Amino acid sequence: MADSDDGLRYALAERDHERIFQQKVLPAMLPASEGAVNPTAIILGGQPGSGKTGLLNDATREMEARGPTVVINGDDMRAFHPEHSQMQRMDPLNAARYTDYDSGRWVEKLIAAAKKQQVNLVIESTMRRPEVFARTANSLQDAGYRVEARALAVPERLSWQSVHQRFEAMLEKGDASRFTAREAHDAGATGMLETLRQLERENQADRVVVSTRAGEVLYDNRQKNGRWRDAPAAANVVLAERQRPLSPPELRKFGRDWSGVLEKMKQRQASPSELTRVTAQAEDDIRWYRAVANELPQHSGVIRRLASTGAAPAAEVPAPTRVGFGRAMSAKRSASETPAPPAPRERETRPEAEPVEAPKPAPRRSGPGMS
């Protein structure tokens, strides 16, 4: 575990930081243009791996149809750090953390510059820190902006799996890879809930929308004359969607996706400790969803056999026998009425599991392995 100051190892000197912002960031990200007539800022929220790209693209198209628009994404800012490319090649697991300090400050400066120009804004974030959201939203409202918050409701187990999928896919293609630390992922998931509660409680947005990764709108609340149209419930809706059981097709896909991650790790000859850790996570997550769906504990060794043999037994992944909870829009009750399950954890050792038959060797194949 790196110490608390390790993230500042590659922080730029103030003179270099400001020079890069003025000479590179501003010309590239804020082209000269007239402001919008009624400027709107859309602030997106979702933990890493939740699938914000689709949300970002939809919001950008919507804003560009209304007038000049600037899209602000912290990941885009990282590329302006002079050491970023080398960090991605040499230490992809920590590259994002090492550039957080400068990229975050460039984001704040770019928002301030765009606000002066009165252009529409689409700001991608995790909504991890309520105080940052409050500072940004309040300053935009004071400058005459209409502010919308749009959040993704995605179970933490699915988003953490997506972090692994993205990392392995980028490595496979030979791209400079980007990996989000688990603590950053979990902090984003937890912090977004408090941000949603705060922004509705303190009227820090004019509209709040919660949707699924697939684009289904679960919640849409607006202010009128300083009052919310409906009783504030954005955080509860996110929690309900995160806690619902997966449907049979969703659980089968979840198992296939973990199989794909582990297969790619074996192909790139990941270390035994890394493979053991991720395998334990996959087993734990599938077991959790089976328990939520009241599934009988059958086929318990599927993922373990994959890690041992390299096979991809997608058809063996069990599906839940029933689906409960209903859709999130029907869950406008307090979070205390629906106790949250334990947060997903990555373990250093395998979880306890019922005995399974000894793994069999995978059949020989002449073609490339499944991905």
Image (spheres, rainbow, N blue to C red):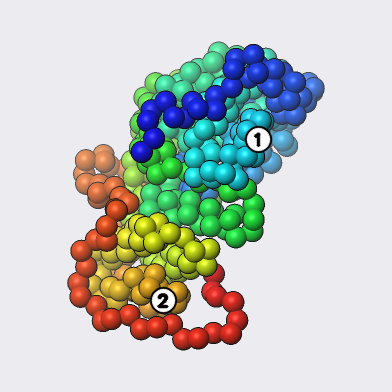
* Residue shown at 57% from the left, 44% from the top: 90
Residue 104 sits above or below residue 58 on the image: above
Mark closer to the chain start, 1 or 2: 1
State the CA–CA distance, disc 1 to disc 2: 39 Å
Residue on which the image places disc 2: 309
Q: Mark 2: which secondary structure? A: helix
Q: Toward which corner of the image does residue 349 lie, by quadrant? A: bottom left
At a point 41% along the width and 76% down the height, the residue shown is 309
Q: Nearer the viewer, residue 158 or 12?
A: 12
Q: On the rendered structure, is 100 left or right of 254?
A: right
Percent of width and height locating residue 366: 58, 85
Whether residue 4 sits left or right of residue 300 in the image: it is right
The image position of residue 289, as x and y in percent, is 31, 62
User: Which of the 4 quarters of the picture holds residue 362?
Assistant: bottom left
Residue 219 lies left or right of residue 333; in this view the side is right
Q: Amino acid at mark 2?
A: Thr
Callout 1 amino acid: Ala
Q: Residues within 10 Å of mark 1 (few under 14, many from 20)?
A: some
When the figure is inspected, residue 113 is found, relative to residue 3, above or below; the finding is: above
| Residue 1 picture location, percent across and down | 36, 38
Badge 1 marks a residue whose secondary structure is: loop
Circle number at residue 79: 1
Q: What label sits on residue 116 in the rendered view?
A: none
